[in-house]
Amino acid sequence: MQTVRDVMTTNVDFCTPLDNVFEVATKMKDLDVGAIPIVENGELLGMITDRDLVVRGIAEKHPGSNPVTNVMSDHLITIGPDTSIAEASHLMAEHQIRRLPVVENGQLIGIVSLGDLAVRDYSDDQAGDALSDISEK
């Protein structure tokens, strides 16, 4: 059985609560990613997605100097590294999310995305099913 640990991205860049929205947007652009975790002392506090930047930042007319804590999502669904790929896919579909932070002993150790699931040798097509479920709702 493949686990999240087998497919997750481990080299995860992050911002801290001291950063502002402009710094997050720049990091997203530089890294070509759609989400940045907000971490303090290794502990995951929240995530900012490109959608968060638009909806809670630009659309609310907050400046780029706005603190990340005003824009981030802080009610997160997380997963442990030894969770099965099937369970990860199920959680993504159930909660309509494309990325799951991987947390172990309270510390962020990686992120698993639909893309991580889709590019692996994953014979039962659960990543595709999860993406279909997310896209339909």
Image: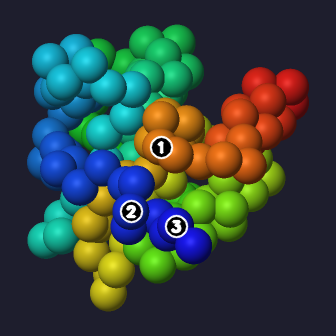
For the residues bearing labels 2 and 1, Cβ distance under 8 angstroms: yes
Classify mark 3: residues with Cα within 10 Å, few (<14), some (14-19) or many (20+). Answer: some
In this orientation, which residue lies closer to the viewer: 38 or 111?
111
- Which residue of the protein is positioned furthest toward the right in this rendering? 136
- Point 25% across, 38% down: residue: 67
Where is residue 74? Give x, y as percent: 48, 56
Label drawn at residue 2: 3
Label drawn at residue 130: none
Q: Is mark 1 on a helix, strand or loop?
A: loop
- Point 34% across, 80% down: residue: 104
Residue denoted by label 1: 120
Would you identify the image quadrant in which residue 29 lies? top left
- Point 79% across, 53% down: residue: 94
Tell me how far mark 1 sits from mark 3, CA to CA.
10 Å
For the residues bearing labels 1 and 3, Cβ distance under 8 angstroms: yes
Q: Is mark 2 on a helix, strand or loop?
A: helix
Where is residue 136? Give x, y as percent: 86, 25
